[in-house]
Image: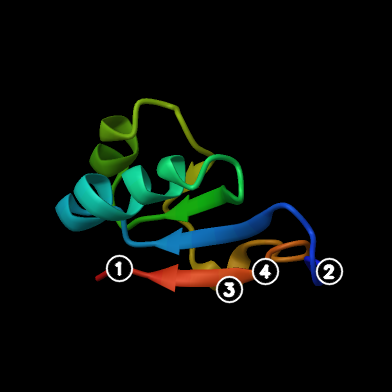
Amino acid sequence: MTQLGSATTRIVLVGAGRRARATLIPAVHAAGGRIELAAVCTRTARTIELLGGRFRATTRSLADLDLSGVDAVVVSV
């Protein structure tokens, strides 16, 4: 977990559809390193392809992921 005053907040994004790719992911980049996208969970392999290998992405359930070190989960569905 991120300690108070720590520079980076690690998040997992659930859902990587059009809204996430057009709004949320660019917002993470605009945060200038204060937010790290630790992983992306999505239903289809096609969406993973659209992410172009820029992030650790999986079609596995969020329950199957190791969430140690993750500060927040953002749901975009």
Earlier residue among tags 2 and 4: 2
Q: Nearer the viewer, residue 30 or 57?
A: 30
Task: Report the mark closest to the observer, 2 or 4.
Answer: 2
Earlier residue among tags 3 and 4: 3
What residue occupies the far right of the structure in this picture? 3
Marks 1 and 3, how far apart in space?
A: 16 Å
Q: Which mark, by number, is residue 3?
A: 2
**Amino acid residing under circle 3:** Ala
- Look at mark 3 in the image and give the residue it sits on: 63
Q: Nearer the viewer, residue 45 or 4?
A: 4
What residue occupies the far left of the structure in this picture? 18
Residues at circles 2 and 4 in contact by the CB criterion of under 8 Å: no
Q: Identify the element where label 3 is drawn.
A: helix
Marks 4 and 1, how far apart in space?
A: 17 Å
- Look at mark 1 in the image and give the residue it sits on: 76
Task: Report the mark closest to the observer, 2 or 3.
Answer: 2
Quadrant where the image shows the N terminus: bottom right
Q: Quadrant of residue 66?
A: bottom right
**Amino acid residing under circle 4:** Asp
Residue 62: where, in percent of width, then height? Answer: 52, 68
**Amino acid residing under circle 1:** Ser
Q: Identify the element where label 1 is drawn.
A: loop
Q: Which mark, by number, is residue 71?
A: 4
Marks 3 and 4, how far apart in space?
A: 15 Å
Residue 34: where, in percent of width, then height? Answer: 61, 50
Q: Identify the element where label 2 is drawn.
A: loop
